[in-house]
Image (spheres, helix red, strand yellow):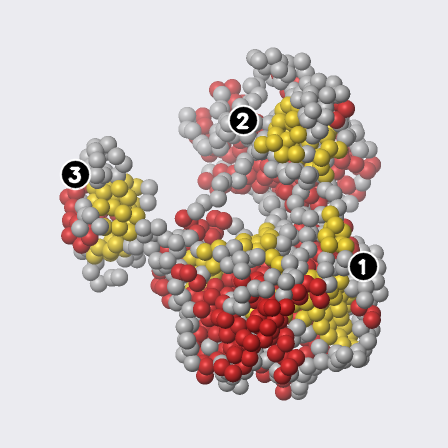
Amino acid sequence: MERSEPVVAPQPEEASCSSWGAGSTNKNLPIMSTESVEIDDALYSRQRYVLGDTAMQKMAKSHVFLSGMGGLGLEIAKNLTLAGIKALTIHDAEKCQAWDLGTNFFLCEDDVVNMRNRAEAVLQHIAELNPYVHVTSSSVSLTETTDLSFLDKYQFISADIHGIWSRLFCDFGDEFEVLDRTGEEPREIFISNITQANPGIVTCLENHPHKLETGQFLTFREINGMTGLNRSTRQITVVSPFSFSIGDTTELEPYLHGGIAVQVKTPTTFYFESLERQVKHPKYLIADLSKPEAPLEIHTAMLALDQFQENYSRKPNIGCQKDSEELLKLATHISETLEEKPEVNADIVRWLSWTAQGFLPPLAAAVGGVASQEVLKAVTGKFSPLCQWLYIEAADIVDSLGKPEHEEFLPRGDRYDALRACIGDTLCQKLQNLNIFLVGCGAIGCEMLKNFALLGVGTSKEKGMVTVTDPDLIEKSNLNRQFLFRPHHIQKPKSFTAAEATLKINPQIKIDAHFKKVCPATEATYNDEFYTKQDIIITALDNVEARRYVDSRCLANLRPLLDSGTMGTKGHTEVIVPHLTESYNSHRDPPEEEIPFCTLKSFPAAIEHTIQWARDKFESSFSHKPALFNKFWQTYASAEEVLQKIQTGHSLEGCFQVIKLLSKRPRSWSQCVELARLKFEKYFNHKALQLLHCFPLDTRLKDGSLFWQSPKRPPCPIKFDFNEPLHFSFLLNAAKLYAAIYCIPFTKEDLSTDGLLNILSKVKIQEFKPSNKVVQTDETARKPDHVPVSSEDERNAVFQLEKAISSNEATKSDLHMAALTFEKDDDRSGHLDFITAASNLRAKMYSIEPADRFKTKRIAGKIIPAIATSTAAVSGLVALEMIKVAGGYPFEAYKNCFLNLALPIIVFTETSEVRKTEIRNGVSFTIWDRWTIHGKEDFTLLDFINAVKEKYGIEPTMVVQGVKMLYVPVMPGHAKRLKLTMHKLVKPSTEKKYVDLTVSFAPDTDGDEDLPGPPVRYYFSHDTD
């Protein structure tokens, strides 16, 4: 059972309510000061990208009072503590019961035996989640006479769960101002034209839609001609995806070229009604558009449940017909008192009555994630609040149970009684028998393990096992979301640590933890036999490529897959069930738009371009080239051997670049500084002069328009100034990185101002001399794979190598470099400092707004913004679908979900039904079908084709293995292959028992494309399958 969870979130300036009542505080834990509100980036970096520093600072001054420490209350407490509010008071007057062990992941059997107060029992565990949050508890009973006047200025949030039904209500006061409704980066739009009219129409660059909405505000800059618009703010009306109007422009000068429009975020006021008013006339979010009537029906039923509890001081008994009928009468009466007078849904009332005493942990995770985000909105004014009700239910789980016996749902005196009251004992046992493979043990992975423990997954004595793998070690930044980890776990394997923590939640669970990546290289471990033993595979991954690989393995072995992911406040879940749904690979998102090569190299227009350029420079100079250098000298033993081979006409791949690196190798710290200074001149002075030499400022295109106009920006050469912090930062960090790859030591004195100035005074900077290199301006051109080597380059390489050998500068130690791996979270490495300085220098050269280190880190490190609220919500929704898969539910029961807690929107949709492909004559297949043919030692390709025809009634005309064409009739010589054995054609490894082939069939009409067929698994002998 779960008590209603009133959560109140005060404004930051209010005093803490933690002293209210008889309370206790966490002991023996250091409490970090939040008075200065300096944000701990090492801990909060991923969340900072979601909320921003202003919201983070408001949070760090806020106090929250949370009543009810059942499963839902604990979920909310966990998420708020991880987020980093200032103080949290948890309140509960109840004692721990055995029932709580299946709903509350921080309680243990000792708490039940000793009948500890629930709030006091979890206090220490919550406090351990974040040393910056002051957590206190209260156990005073709330009655009608309790003085709650201290809550008057608090915003009010209420959340409760009754079995498979939940509701969430928000009241942030009569008026509530939101500073940023969406949290999205303000859009920047490059302008191609502005009309001189009323209204003036702004047109974007071709193929760059503005993605704006009518009513939004824009400010303008860098417009040539119609300069009166610069620094002005205009409200817009959308005309088309590529244009919008901005009001009267007739009084302004005619537009010439260029210009950027930047979205301006404006405050929005939200209006709330009291709970008393909203009960009668609710405003609610519709989560399932296929059931728009459901929220009001659930609202009515839950009001009836409130009335039932008030009348009888209890909830309806499990499966009690009398209580169900009474609840229906109450619902019918309440419906008449509501303004909309909704129809009463008897099925909802019946299942609410049946399951109300129960508690579904994954539903608590989902609702707790949403509710926690609403609390953060209340204390920060960031994102759009819920207006005002949300109902999330798991009715699909019971809809497919038909008419079960009520004994199925009755308590048995164990930790699963609350779950059993929701889904029945048979389904509980199926969960306990499950074999689950969890791929990834990050934020979603930790939440999933918690859900498994509460649901009893893999706890059966006879069978059932949770296998979890993750190749990563725990970092400090993980602690902000991955709640199973603590500071003393840093640099320990995620999977082993999480497994150990999960056993504390439920000692009965069986977990096999691996420290491996799931990829082709580990198929000896994660082979077909491994997959076929799994009942469900669940991915908790952070990249598409890994998801696609796991999906292909699930498809090949006919295993269900549950996928999910988050990015900031956004999240998705996807259910993939053999023979029912499409697979993950069935749909592909459009590829991420790449920055054109010429834009990166010569014509950046935005800070993203300069950051990517700087990251590429880092990879090229400090990672790729050293790795290439080492690989080359692992192939060739000595410089003398290489010289001999070049002189005798051998072509050695990469040798010219390697010899160039060897000949220019710095031998001392002063030479590293010199190299860094020369790179400064090359990147930020000579590059600009070369571009302006090729394309002077007055250069015009064939149509008469200026070459240098938006989005192209003419560069301005930068003159090195040691006293400029940006110049100094580039010089110092580049020199340190060169020292790192060439293994050159340096001291503190070497880094002193005097020491560096002394070195720089001896550096000779050559004057710029224009080259005849062609500057690429074609946006469709790609970076060339290989730079051609001229005969002069070859002669020069021989000379340089001979010189290095004769100077004794090609010894064994000289033939090694240290390749660096970009470390975005290690401030001591200097990697990010180099990229920030290089990017901002290039931005300055092209008059682009620079980016601070924080933004540079996100873009250069490709950091995915993350917050615990959306992670918890997504994992809960995945676990609900897992219950359905375990129960073997029909297609209609499964739901995919997309959510954005910032807006907030939650959208449940049906899964994609598997498509059937017709071949001909009634022969068809889906992606889940796999034909099988068993051969023998002397089985030929012709035997294989005949076997397919005999078994499946249709003759293949083409046979392909991966990208290798085994048999295509029109290809020369392929007819002769019909007599070859399959062993000879396929060449299997000794341990390989089968090969997967693709077959096609002749089209119905000549000239049409061949008809595709399903994969055909060919076994090399009859005794394998």
The residue tagged with tag 3: helix, strand or loop? helix
Kind of residue sitting beneath label 3: Lys
What x and y, as percent, mark residue 766?
A: 70, 21
What x and y, as percent, mark residue 747?
A: 75, 45
Q: Does 936 appear above or below 710?
A: below
- Sort mark 3 into few (<14), some (14-19) or many (20+) by Cα contacts within 10 Å: few
Residue 12 tag number: 1
Q: CA distance from mark 3 to mark 1?
A: 81 Å
Kind of residue sitting beneath label 1: Pro
Residue at 61% x, 31% y: name it. 239
Residue 863 tag number: none
Residue at 73% x, 21% y: name it. 250
Q: CA distance from mark 3 to mark 2?
A: 47 Å
- Depth order, front residue of 413/745: 413
Residue 976 tag number: 3
State the quadrant of the N terminus.
Answer: bottom right
Q: Is residue 860 visible?
A: yes
Nearer the observer, disc 2 or disc 1?
1
Kind of residue sitting beneath label 2: Glu
Q: Does 252 appear above or below 288?
A: above
Asked if the residue at tag 2 contacts the one at tag 3, i.e. Cβ–Cβ closer than 8 Å, the answer is no
Compare marks 3 and 1 and give the one earlier in the sequence: 1
- Depth order, front residue of 850/83: 83
- Sort mark 1 into few (<14), some (14-19) or many (20+) by Cα contacts within 10 Å: many
Compare marks 2 and 1 and give the one earlier in the sequence: 1
Residue beneath disc 2: 779
Direction from residue 617 to residue 550 in the image, left or right: left
State the quadrant of the C terminus.
Answer: bottom left
Q: Does 182 appear above or below 196?
A: below
What x and y, as percent, mark residue 59?
A: 76, 58
- Depth order, front residue of 185/846: 185
Q: Is residue 604 visible?
A: no
